[in-house]
Structure formats: C-alpha cells, structure tokens
Amino acid sequence: MDDSRRFSTEEIQDIFRRAAERQQAARGEGDESGLTLAELKQIGEESGLSAAHIEAAAADLAGGLASEEVAAQTVREPRGVERFYRTSSWARVDRVLPGQVDAETWEEMVKILESVFQNAGKTTTAGPIREWHLASSFGFDLRALQSGSTPGDWLRIFDSMSTPTKGPVTVEVRPEGSGTRVEMSYAMPPGRLWEGPGLMLLFLTIAIITTVVSVTVGEPLVLIAPAVMLLLAAGLGSYTFVSHRNEIELTRERLEKAVERLYHLQAAKTGQKEAEPQGHAASAQRDSEDESATRAASSSEPLLDSIEDRPSEAEGSASESPRRTRS
C-alpha cells in the first residue's frame, strides 16, 4: 500500500476503530473495545498531536458534547410569553479548553468578549473562577451615565442601546481537571419579553373602549380612533416580534462565535507553552552534543600527537640499525 496516500477524517476514524478492534481481539479481551485515554495520548503524541488537546476533546465527549459541534448549546422549549416569539429566550454554551487560563490570557479573552458582543461588561474574580457579565438588560451600565462628562461619552453610551445583544450575558471560566471549562449563558429578561404582547394588549384594549364609545354615541367618525389603535397594536407587535427574535438568534450565534475564539486563543497559548520546554530541551541537547564533541576532539589531540610521533621514532631506529651493522 502506498504510504504517501492521505486519508480523510472519516477514513482515519474508521482505521483507528478497526485497529482498536483488532488489537483487543489479539489480546483476547472479549467484547471490550476502544482505547484508553493514556493510549489515545500516546497515539496522538506519536502523530504530533498535543496531549492537552486530546484530553480536552475527551472531556468534551465525557460532558456529552457532540463531536461534530463546536460547542454544546442548550436551548429549552419556549415557555409562557416566549411562545409569542416561537423560540426560547434562554441559551447556554459550554466547552472545555486545553490547559489552564492565566491572568494575561484572561485579559485577552475579555477583549474578545467585548468585541464579539459589541459591549463592555464587568469582570469579577473569585479564586480560580473568573466571570464576565454584561451589565444590564438594556445593553449598558446605568452607573456609566454618571461618568459621561462629554457629549462623545453620552453618544457612546446611548449608541450601545442599539447593540443587538443587550444582555444579560454571563461568561464563567473555571478550572476542570487539567483543562478549563467555559460556560456562557444568555436570557432575555421577562420585562423585555412582555414588551410586544403588552403593547398589543394595551392598544387592543383602547381600540375596544373607543369602539364601544363610538357605538354608544352614534358617531361613525369616532371609529377612526379604534382603527388607528388596531394598526398601532399590529405594528408594534410585529416590530417587537422581529427585533426581539433576531436579538435572541443573533446572541446564540455570538455565544458560539465567542467560545470558538476563546478555544483557539487558549489552544494557541497552550501550544506555545508546550513548544517552549521542547525548544529548551532541544537546545540543551544540542549544547550537550556540542560539549561532547568538544571533549572528544580535545581528548583525541594527544592520541593524534602520539600517532604522528611514532613514524619519526621508527625512522630513527631504522637509521641507527645500519650504523650498528657497519660497526
């Protein structure tokens, strides 16, 4: 078989599965098939894969994450007023990252979160657990209004109100084994969920009252008011339905995007940390080899000198032998 042929991901999985089954059959271990985590790490290291990444992937599977998904997103069935929007207002995404997150990496993660959600949040730290929280349900921190001393600050604050993700979004980062688990959750507050149905009920009630009044008074022109109220109810209800539903769906996409970026950031950081010891080890090995070569060269110099001196000694003895013969 040609050793240079490249296999697809599905073929690689099938090859390892078949190899594992054959190995288990050769060991005579019955129906127990598969590989242990230690065996997977050994195979991965021989293939050039990081053991930390393999352990993180195994933790994903142990936590119930699907292998074809970037992260596990949990969305429950709509309840109560959520049925008006035909979707749940709550979402949660989690994933296990390789290695431990240090303070420098956490600062970079915060910048990524602020960029993805287009909003500045608040960070808290409790021991090894770190959190990032989007301040209020309206998309900005009300306390920030007190610090706005220039028109630019006020424009920046009120511009954040149009941000599609208006919170609250909570991101928690905590150690889990040799890796780090990231959990992100979002939930639209009930007050905002009731904006659409509440406005519709309000204007429908006004329309009914004005209709009864117009019929009682007997003035047909008064029916214009109920018609306007009905149009307002339909328009505002449609607007809140579209805007809130889009915000919910867009925030779910942003949760997946954010956790994916955090994963790649931490994977890159972990890869760099693993590469540094290997680089130091390779450098130390090269230094030891150079030192050994130097020692070997220095020890070979006396031997070479002795070898070079031997012919001269032989020539001297050969020149003395004729003299002895003549005498």
Image (spheres, rainbow, N blue to C red):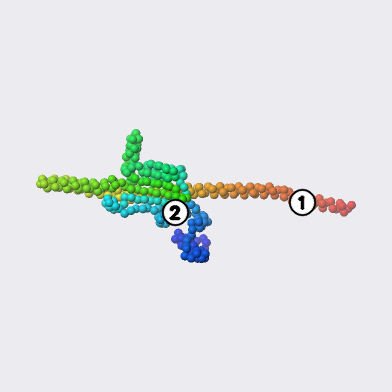
Image coordinates of residue 171 in percent, x first then y, are 39, 46
The extreme left residue here reads 218
Q: Residue at x 37, y 44 (%)?
A: 133
Amino acid beneath label 1 = Arg
Q: Residue at x 34, y 45 (%)?
A: 168
Q: Which residue is mark 1?
A: 310
Amino acid beneath label 2 = Ala
Give yes or no for contact between labels 2 and 1 (Cβ–Cβ under 8 Å): no
Quarter-of-image position of residue 162: top left
Q: Which residue is mark 2?
A: 59
Nearest the eye: 279 or 25 = 25
> Is residue 268 in view?
no
Q: CA distance from mark 2 to mark 1?
A: 71 Å
Image coordinates of residue 297 in percent, x first then y, are 67, 48
Label 2: how many Cα within 10 Å (few below 14, some 14–19, many 20+): many
Image coordinates of residue 111 in percent, x first then y, are 41, 43
Label for residue 225? none
Earlier along the polypeptide chain: callout 2 or callout 1?
2
Q: Secondary structure at mark 1?
A: helix
